[in-house]
Amino acid sequence: MKTVTKRDLVVQISNETGMTQQQVFDVIQKTLDTITTTLAGGDEVVLRNFGSFQVRETKQKIGRNPNKPDTDVIIPPRAIVKFKPGKEMKERVANVLPQIQNQETTEAPPAAATPSPETGSL
């Protein structure tokens, strides 16, 4: 699976619509800025068949500093953005599972060698 960047989206949409890349970039950037501003205001953003972005609060919790494991560190509550995919996205993404599984098996490191039963060694 490859990573698709904002630049990749701009080029693809520009090629499909005939708009200039600068126009497409401006629209995408303005869309992302508006979503961010809306979420920063505490509101929810819903894009039908795509999903919704919601601001949620994490609870305060106690963590550990790996350098000083005997010392507790209080992690304060904070606001985070949660994405909840829409029905159509869930259905379309569910079809990618076999590709992900195949990719994981091809990228998995080889299993450790085991001694041969006949010789007792590798």
Image (cartoon, rainbow, N blue to C red):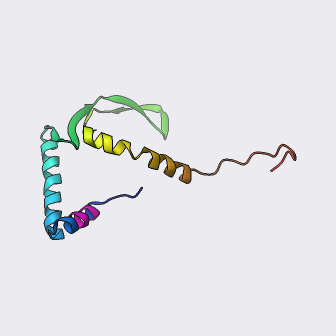
Q: Image check: 56 left or right of 64?
A: left
User: Which residue is rendered at x = 31% and y = 29% of the image?
Assistant: 60
The vertical placement of 22 against 92, above or below, is below
The vertical placement of 119 against 68, above or below, is below
Q: Image check: 32 left or right of 106?
A: left
User: Which residue is rendered at x = 23% and y = 33% of the image?
Assistant: 56
Q: Nearer the viewer, residue 36 or 90?
A: 90
Quarter of the rendering containing residue 71: top left
Give the dominant element type of the magenta stretch: helix, strand or loop. helix
User: Which residue is rendered at x = 42% and y = 55% of the image?
Assistant: 1
Q: How far from the left and from the top, in percent, is residue 119? A: 87, 47
Looking at the rendering, the stretch of residues picked out in magenta corresponds to 8-13
Q: Is residue 68 visible?
A: yes
Q: How far from the left and from the top, in percent, is residue 3? A: 36, 58
Q: How far from the left and from the top, in percent, is residue 97? A: 43, 44
User: Which residue is rendered at x = 16% and y = 69% of the image?
Assistant: 18
Quarter of the rendering containing residue 87: top left
Q: How many marks?
A: 0
Q: Is residue 48 magenta?
A: no
The vertical placement of 68 against 29, above or below, is above
Q: How far from the left and from the top, in percent, is residue 122? A: 80, 50
Q: Residue furthest right?
A: 119
